[in-house]
Amino acid sequence: MSRENRANDEIRKTTIELNHLENPDGSAFIETGNTKVLCTVMVEESLPPWINEEEAEQGWLTAEYGMLPGCAEERVRRERRGAKGRTKEIQRLIGRCLRAGIDLKKVGARTFWVDCDVIQADGGTRTASITGAWAALKLTVDKMVEKGILDEDPMKKQVAATSVGVVDGEELLDLCFEDDFAADVDMNVVMDDQGDFIEIQATGEEAVFTREQHDELLNLAEKGIKELIEIQRKAFQ
Amino acid sequence: MSRENRANDEIRKTTIELNHLENPDGSAFIETGNTKVLCTVMVEESLPPWINEEEAEQGWLTAEYGMLPGCAEERVRRERRGAKGRTKEIQRLIGRCLRAGIDLKKVGARTFWVDCDVIQADGGTRTASITGAWAALKLTVDKMVEKGILDEDPMKKQVAATSVGVVDGEELLDLCFEDDFAADVDMNVVMDDQGDFIEIQATGEEAVFTREQHDELLNLAEKGIKELIEIQRKAFQ
Amino acid sequence: MSRENRANDEIRKTTIELNHLENPDGSAFIETGNTKVLCTVMVEESLPPWINEEEAEQGWLTAEYGMLPGCAEERVRRERRGAKGRTKEIQRLIGRCLRAGIDLKKVGARTFWVDCDVIQADGGTRTASITGAWAALKLTVDKMVEKGILDEDPMKKQVAATSVGVVDGEELLDLCFEDDFAADVDMNVVMDDQGDFIEIQATGEEAVFTREQHDELLNLAEKGIKELIEIQRKAFQ
Amino acid sequence: MSRENRANDEIRKTTIELNHLENPDGSAFIETGNTKVLCTVMVEESLPPWINEEEAEQGWLTAEYGMLPGCAEERVRRERRGAKGRTKEIQRLIGRCLRAGIDLKKVGARTFWVDCDVIQADGGTRTASITGAWAALKLTVDKMVEKGILDEDPMKKQVAATSVGVVDGEELLDLCFEDDFAADVDMNVVMDDQGDFIEIQATGEEAVFTREQHDELLNLAEKGIKELIEIQRKAFQ
Amino acid sequence: MSRENRANDEIRKTTIELNHLENPDGSAFIETGNTKVLCTVMVEESLPPWINEEEAEQGWLTAEYGMLPGCAEERVRRERRGAKGRTKEIQRLIGRCLRAGIDLKKVGARTFWVDCDVIQADGGTRTASITGAWAALKLTVDKMVEKGILDEDPMKKQVAATSVGVVDGEELLDLCFEDDFAADVDMNVVMDDQGDFIEIQATGEEAVFTREQHDELLNLAEKGIKELIEIQRKAFQ
Amino acid sequence: MSRENRANDEIRKTTIELNHLENPDGSAFIETGNTKVLCTVMVEESLPPWINEEEAEQGWLTAEYGMLPGCAEERVRRERRGAKGRTKEIQRLIGRCLRAGIDLKKVGARTFWVDCDVIQADGGTRTASITGAWAALKLTVDKMVEKGILDEDPMKKQVAATSVGVVDGEELLDLCFEDDFAADVDMNVVMDDQGDFIEIQATGEEAVFTREQHDELLNLAEKGIKELIEIQRKAFQ
């Protein structure tokens, strides 16, 4: 899908459906334009083997990301010989960002498994994964608090993300695949509901960008993420 | 979901939604009770490297199967260190059964990539994959014929599948997860729209079964598959 | 080797040599026509790591299958990058069938490692593996009972297997490689000494078969397996 | 090594030794404080298999990164079961940044293999790799131009990198390991000799940072990189 | 099996059975005491991909080595996650030694696949593999000459091998497993029928040995290999 | 580098720099002509998982070997899909030889990790690794004794190694890459400071050698290793 008549500072229509699946502890299905990601959270009552006793005063959260073979125009090969570099980068990013939103000292010796699977890809799958996974995590934690499994709410803040970029010399908010493909500069921004930053990843894609462009892109990202934070909030009402 | 008040010879409510995704050449989303499988077909204009020139008078069809981590009660690990034995068995089964339904001599030097991804699992995922993937394949081929990519319709027959089994001494049609877990005998049956058999896989699951039980199970499977064939047909009307 | 003047309902000459090797706890060398499989059983005094304490009231039996590189006309590559799908299917089949023949609750916290290695292949290697491995297992268990390692004989039943198929419209018993290659329908059947079924795997190999053909194939298999059961019995006299 | 009496806006003593090794086409040994990285470039007269003919109007550049087992306080395991996520991220980063500095359309159908191996690690190994690898690349290209292998100089710009971060509420330039370990915010910045940006990667390390902190960190990075650009320049005089 | 009443300078009873299997181009089954190795040779009418055109004036020979799981007292795990270091060492040794015995310039653009599979292990499996594989190779080549596939006999010399060692201060010829286990020094020697050496591998197994011991071990090896050369010769009469 | 005007029985200029790196427990940088190897030792306060309790009365020592991609004229690929056969052979050799030099019963339940990384390769990297790694090990152990971590000095003997070979009919000591490439016979010899042998590996590289040649090669090796032992000794003065 092309940008069509969307304004440069406009995000795509975004919806978050909670409880999309029966089995996970929490699940959210996020659609941003044509991008669709299924986010699930499953809680394991143990810690990964590499966490030793000293650290055992807190829980852990780990994220995985995948693309269904039919999600894109060209078939995406299953990563059965190990995850690709891009996949590992995205997984690490999702994990770091969600850990910024939760106080793992309050969850006990548990592991939160977050899975983001792209059902349909049209740009921005990693940022949609973060925005949707936060909702699935919040849902999981709310249920645990309600059932008395957790004494205290460990959620610290909302976490949401979007992409911005420079295409044909113009700064654009929320890149679809066509935008992304044409972009000279591509930036992923993750923020919280206080307006603070969690991650900024800006790359010239083998080109460069000025400080002024950089600042304008951050402004756009701030605007878009503020709207996504509001969409998350409404999904829980 | 338990069997509830479903009769022993009754299949679960089954729906097939065609064109579920935008990008694949054909896609079908099949729901059988709580089991949900997304089936996609993507056509590649070349043959796999292991097919040499002599065989190049025909195309090829290959199938892959996967489970999303959140599809089941316990998280399903991604198979990033190679597919498990069960996965490979299912993939080979789906491929063989679909190849029985299409005349690959009529499709040119092309490869049909069939992907079946389980979104939610409640028993019978491999048989639902076959029934749904046939629909996605049919859809793909119909479009190719319509666009003139294929001169002739290569589809030979409808292919559908179900499972049957013996639970507490009773023969049951279309096992959900709870049935399957309790079954002493488990049988997957694949048939065509002429009432002929494509595959039968019956296992005593470390138990045994008599010839009589075997014959009764085949009767049930014939009944169920006839109904699934009808559901496939209606999806294309 | 072709079928030559063997009748359609005749099995190949089959011999089972017990104690073929010095080191394993039990070993059997089975020859069925030109197919030769070396079956060994080795007992480990522990359980696999994935069996937790609750299940530890019983032992475990696992099977592996391999082909020597020189067993076939074309060299068979060693599976040093992971077992192929076909290998995993066969291993799982052998394991399930043997577990149907032994009461693992009576063997203590032990693992039976069953290995079937094809020295020469001329069709029917998986069914010969089952028939031969049962003999190696029985031998192993007999020695354990004799030495007082086991208080009680855990063997429940004899297990034997053969293949049947439709070649040029005729139903044939015990397919050699040439038969198998030409077969439209191929069925592996595993039974016990009571005449009950443990596994049936029938595949149209991308073709189909009628209920009548299916029933006739089962009749042939029953005849052949009855004879194999007798050959097993004689090997122990 | 701790920060000692280095000012907050001061980089560590940095040296670049060209032609450190005999065999590679170009090599540079960079030392930044206690961090030591050996950067080599080797030119292959062919393109990677995944580049097809259309793209063959240009060359390719790919980077790999490794840590010697003895480079850190705790032994670093060799990555013989595949590169870790962190390694892949760094490799991709180095490759992207160097490609921003060279016009691959002017190098013919060649591949530049860039290798960055950490001999001793004390923070900032990825940014030192970029700064050093640029020098090894420049050296390689200079020799190719001198020998007449290349008609035209493909180098477009200098590329250098440093890290900045927030430690105990203070913004610091060029983090050593001790700083990095204590940092709440960690940012890697890559720039060219025009003062433009190639990459910015800022992460709250599970914390957050304000827009003001972000802007101050960029200021520090600009200062440091300007000095590194000068050190590179001097190495070539 | 212990050394029993075998003299220190005596080899074990050794037999070589040619044409042990139907399918390979050549096969030999060697028994040395209780050690049994099945050696097969299969000829492929192409060269490995890493041999480029310039070298294509000659053929290639490659060897693989494996142990059946039941060959030893403790089950030998299948090497399905890659060959172990020991296996790779042995494979390389067998290949090098056989290539010393054949003039690959006279065999055309062919690959000889040599496979040595240990059916039963009682020490000396690598040296028995060499001695037996030479016979399988000779047999293969003889048939090719006879059929006119090769114009000229490429076999240059006989190749045979044995092990020697120091056990309890005594130099012994042809170590069985028990000897080998107790040996302070272990030496594998490969020679030709002219009495020249192809390989010597002597290891103190974390101990040391004097020049005098070394010389005496070589004397024993020369005696033993002379006898093995004779046994090979007789197998072809 | 060619042999130049070095005599046939002359070793290359060899230096050993102790404490080359800050982080490992011991490190030595050995240069032999143009060959440069960085040897490090790191001590882990535990034993590998495969050592069971009975053996736990002693420590363990394990060695790894690697080549930097830029160490040779042609780029050396990183072994990220598993170590090659040659690598594994060398690693096992280094480990065995060093274990001959230390009494592991005196080091407690510790593992010595020895890493030899080739920075520049010009022949003899495996023998230089042994000679250099011994120095790194000695350094490590000396520090442990000094700090009172070890009560008793576990070092039993010095261990050093060199290569010899036959090139154009002449026996040569200490082969550089050019010699090695041209050699008909190649022999690696490892000895201690008493003049006893730890390992001898002689290979005809698909050629053969006489007993006389063999004896002369050993004489050369003895001469060279005596000199290397002296160089090691001086490094510790």
Image (spheres, coloured by chain):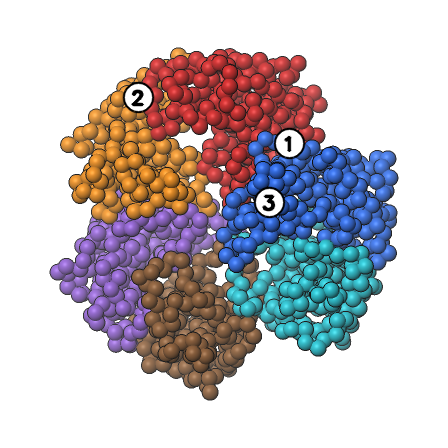
Chain colours: A cyan, B brown, C purple, D blue, E orange, F red
Mark 1 or mark 3, which has the lower sequence index? 1
Residue at the image position 51 percent from the left and 16 percent from the top: F5
Instruction: Tell me: residue A140, above or below residue A4.
Output: above
Give residue E111's position: percent from left, percent from top: 32, 42
Local secondary structure at mark 3: loop
Identify residue type, mark 3.
Answer: Asp
Task: Report the amino acid beneath label 2.
Answer: Asp
- Does residue F169 appear anywhere in the picture? yes
Q: Which residue is mark 3?
A: D151
Question: Where is mark 1, residue-wise?
Answer: D20
* Discs 2, 1 touching: Cβ within 8 Å: no
In the image, taking residue D36 as reference, residue F217 lies left or right, namely left
F212 left or right of F113 in image = left
Do discs 3 and 2 share a chain?
Answer: no
Q: Is residue A166 left or right of residue C210?
A: right
Question: At 15% across and 63% down in the image, what residue appears?
Answer: C7
Where, by quadrant of the figure, is residue B111 drawn?
A: bottom left
Cα–Cα span, label 3 and label 2: 56 Å
